[in-house]
Amino acid sequence: MNICVVGTGYVGLVTALGFAKLGNRVICVDKDDDKIGNLNKGIPSIYEEGIEEILRECLEKKRIAFTNDLSEGINNSEIIFIAVGTPEKDDWNIDMTQVHEVVNQISNIISSYKIIVIKSTVPVGTQRETKKHLREKGVPEENFDIVSNPEFLSEGRALNDFLNGDRIVIGCDSSKGKIIMRKVYEHFNSEIIYTLPETAEIIKYASNAFLATKISFINEIANLCTKVGANIETVAYAMGLDKRIAPEFLRAGIGFGGSCFPKDTKALVKIGENHGIDLKIIRSAIRVNEKQRLIPIKILLNKYGKLENKTITILGLAFKPKTDDIRNAPSLTIIEELIKNKARIKCYDPIATDKVKNMQWDILCYKNLYDAVDKSDCAIICTEWDEIYSMDLSIVKERMNYPMIIDGRNILDLEKVKESEIEYYSIGRLN
Ligand SMILES: NC(=O)C1=CN([C@@H]2O[C@H](COP(=O)(O)OP(=O)(O)OC[C@H]3O[C@@H](n4cnc5c(N)ncnc54)[C@H](O)[C@@H]3O)[C@@H](O)[C@H]2O)C=CC1
Ligand SMILES: O=C(O)[C@H]1O[C@H](OP(=O)(O)OP(=O)(O)OC[C@H]2O[C@@H](n3ccc(=O)[nH]c3=O)[C@H](O)[C@@H]2O)[C@H](O)[C@@H](O)[C@@H]1O
């Protein structure tokens, strides 16, 4: 099939490459000329393992092309996927500017039947509002169908998630649209749920909010474990053996970050509010998460009283391993607090340091972990990178000014920590 994908970020690029790999012809559109230039040269706009090879393979086979010209994408495709950003606003509502811009542009270009698929995570009601908007802009009804098709991929294993997701959700109120969407996904093995657009839109938010709540739940239990001398790892393991609970998303730590859980939980609370429903559980999950990030600061203040002239190392900047994405990462909140407390800050991350350098903070970034802990008074683990998990604790101890680690992701081997005689804090583990 001929497919156009608008937006070449994490979701857009992965969607485009996934469809291209399956033999479709895909045109990707982005308004960022630098991204388009790089993508045409085979340089991905995001970091994901294996994506560069697939990009180059698809370019060579001429299954994918990148342009900044939306009309080229639309005129050569039967289906248009919208995968632009939907960031959060200060009031927790969603900023729909990027989606609205694309829809307006489409309304000026479209001249024959197209399916417009909303892949971005958008507030409930967006499919219907978009339909109304296109009609008001004079686009004849017979020229389009609008489908809500939210994406469930996780960064770090995005392409695999896209191609082998647990489910595909299609929110569509036209039978013609449904038939074409069935064809789009005919080579996927995932269960496909056809439903109303509003239901599809809620499924996306409810799924993310449920997973975020599971994390906040286990984090509260971990905090209790710390107080009563219980071990969160055994608690989580035993809970996870119950099939009704399941072991995933029970890893305690400094909480969830990223471009989606923080934004989508807040957006769902706001959607509830806009409809007169107070979503109390999700509101609490957000509050628990915001506090969880501050645990390392509390431990440090307990230990040192004040942090002025102390050197603190952040081990891991990305919001999770295998990505260079630092959007809403717990590490950033911790750095901001350390700056407020006038600490000297050193950071290590195998791939995300450049993104933090762009923030122009007065902090030092290292690509070598041992240089980052040199003369430090405490190292805080914020991301569970393999490189951090497997660091040599004897070297770390030797290079630090005072040997202290706060393990915000509960990853270090407790035996090795004990042997190293480093002062060690975790989130609910028994040392
Ligand atoms: N990042 C993730 O893991 C997931 C994200 N989502 C959702 O997918 C959507 C996209 O997220 P990301 O890919 O992370 O966003 P992103 O910010 O990485 O990428 C968005 C892209 O859209 C482009 N763009 C913006 N306006 C445009 C326009 N008018 N014309 C052409 N291109 C335009 C931007 O230049 C950028 O390259 C969001 O709604 C997000 O909530 C859903 C599942 C997973
Ligand atoms: O809508 C989205 O954007 C995506 O959001 C998440 O994917 P992602 O944010 O890439 O990463 P996750 O693996 O879900 O991790 C999110 C955060 O939760 C944290 N986490 C995760 C699991 C856990 O047990 N404990 C925990 O603290 C991670 O460290 C990370 O900061 C969802 O898992 C995807 O299904 C969804 O499509």
Image: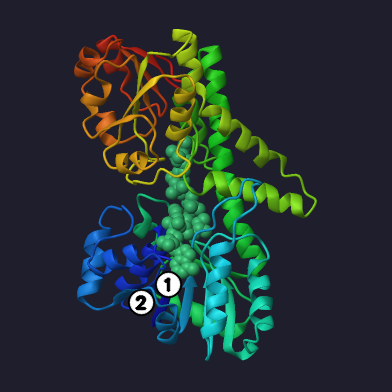
Q: Amino acid at mark 1?
A: Val
Give residue 33's position: percent from left, percent from top: 35, 67
Instruction: Classify mark 1: residues with Cα within 10 Å, few (<14), some (14-19) or many (20+).
Output: many
Mark 2 element type = strand
Q: CA distance from mark 1 to mark 2?
A: 7 Å
Query: Tags 1 and 2 in contact by the CB under 8 Å rule?
Result: yes
Instruction: Classify mark 2: residues with Cα within 10 Å, few (<14), some (14-19) or many (20+).
Output: many
118 lies above or below 166: below
Residue 125 in view of the camera: yes
| 416 or 374, nearer to the observer | 374
In the image, taking residue 272 as reference, residue 301 lies left or right, namely: left
Give residue 101's position: percent from left, percent from top: 55, 69
Give residue 269's position: percent from left, percent from top: 68, 47
53 lies above or below 389: below
Q: Identify the image's colour scheme: rainbow, by chain, secondary structure or one colour.
A: rainbow
Give residue 259's position: percent from left, percent from top: 48, 48
To which quarter of the image does residue 132 belong?
bottom right
307 lies above or below 202: above
Q: Which mark is residue 5?
A: 1
To which quarter of the image does residue 218 belong?
top right
In the image, taking residue 300 as reference, residue 379 lies left or right, namely: left
Mark 1 element type = strand
Q: Which mark is residue 26?
A: 2
Locate the C terminus and report the quarter of the image it occupies. Answer: top left
Q: Which mark is residue 52?
A: none
| 411 or 341, nearer to the observer | 341
| Residue drawn 57% across the image and 32% down it | 290
Q: Amino acid at mark 2?
A: Val
Q: Residue furthest right?
A: 276
| Residue drawn 56% across the image and 38% down it | 214
